[in-house]
Image (cartoon, rainbow, N blue to C red):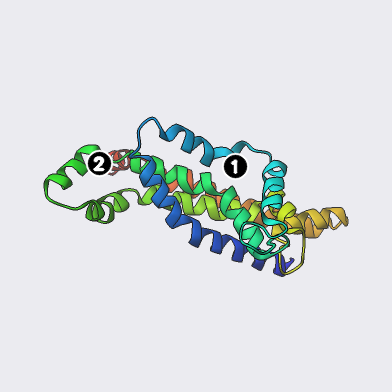
Amino acid sequence: MDMDAILLSLKLALWTLVLILPFGVWVAHSLQRMGKSKSWIEASLALPLVLPPTVLGYYLLVGLGGKSFFGVPLVFSFTGILIASLIVNLPFAIQPIQRAFEAINPEIIEAAQVSGLSNWQIFRLIELPLAWRGITSAAVLTFAHTLGEFGVVLMVGGAIPGETKTVSIAIYDKVQSFDATGAGALSLLLLAISLVAIAVSYGIFGQNPSRQKRWRV
């Protein structure tokens, strides 16, 4: 096992999750309140799902190279792959939460408004607790997807051991060096994590509460 690559991937996934989840909640909550104009915004946020990793990686390489938008070059650094990871994971962090907010019965919100609760109180006391399934699903999918990201991370960060060489890149390197045992072990690790993430997202947290109630009866 390449422990350096595993620890780096975990570090990248955790930082991505910490930074993107609050942003995802804010964007998702804002989108579900918009009208027809939100279509273009939703399409833009979903682009990482359909864009080839090489295309997205190229634009990030151009944007983060040289002096970049931040005044210093960020390619081939952990900060660079973190920014890339945040952009790539936007759909995974926003869409499940948006669907959860949209599933809340509008009558509940109307009742809270009539009761005199402020928008912040409604969001904190009512909407967030009701959307917890979507938020948890987004967190699990984002974490798992970050661990397995390859193309964009490779283009922006290269394969610097301890700095940008993640598990997926380590698997590629082991295959290139004909280390089938090492590649198989790392691949099995990512397979297990992905399977758990899908099971959690579409199983436990994706169940319909009304269906669960019927089962209990």
Q: Could you tell me which quadrant the N terminus lies in?
A: bottom right
State the mark number for residue 48: 1
Q: Counting other residues with Cα less than 10 Å from the Cα at mark 1, is it few (<14), some (14-19), or many (20 or more)? A: some
Q: Counting other residues with Cα less than 10 Å from the Cα at mark 2, is it few (<14), some (14-19), or many (20 or more)? A: few
Secondary element type, mark 1: helix
Name the foreground residue: 54 vs 191.
54
In the displayed structure, 161 sits above or below 200; it is below
> Disc 2 residue type?
Val
Name the foreground residue: 167 vs 61.
61
Residue 94 image position (x, y, % from top left): 46, 46
State the mark number for residue 173: none
Q: Residue at x 16, y 46 (%)?
A: 113
Residue 166 image position (x, y, % from top left): 70, 60
Give the labeled residue for mark 2. Answer: 217
| Farthest top residue in view | 36
Does label 2 or label 1 sit earlier along the sequence?
A: 1
Q: Residue at x 31, y 42 (%)?
A: 209
Residue 46 image position (x, y, % from top left): 54, 39
Q: Residue at x 49, y 56 (%)?
A: 20
In this picture, residue 71 sits left or right of residue 116: right
Marks 2, 1: nearer the viewer:
1
| Farthest right residue in view | 177
Residue 132 seen anywhere in this rendered image of the structure: yes
Secondary element type, mark 2: loop
Residue 150 seen anywhere in this rendered image of the structure: no
**Mark 2 touches mark 1? (CB < 8 Å):** no
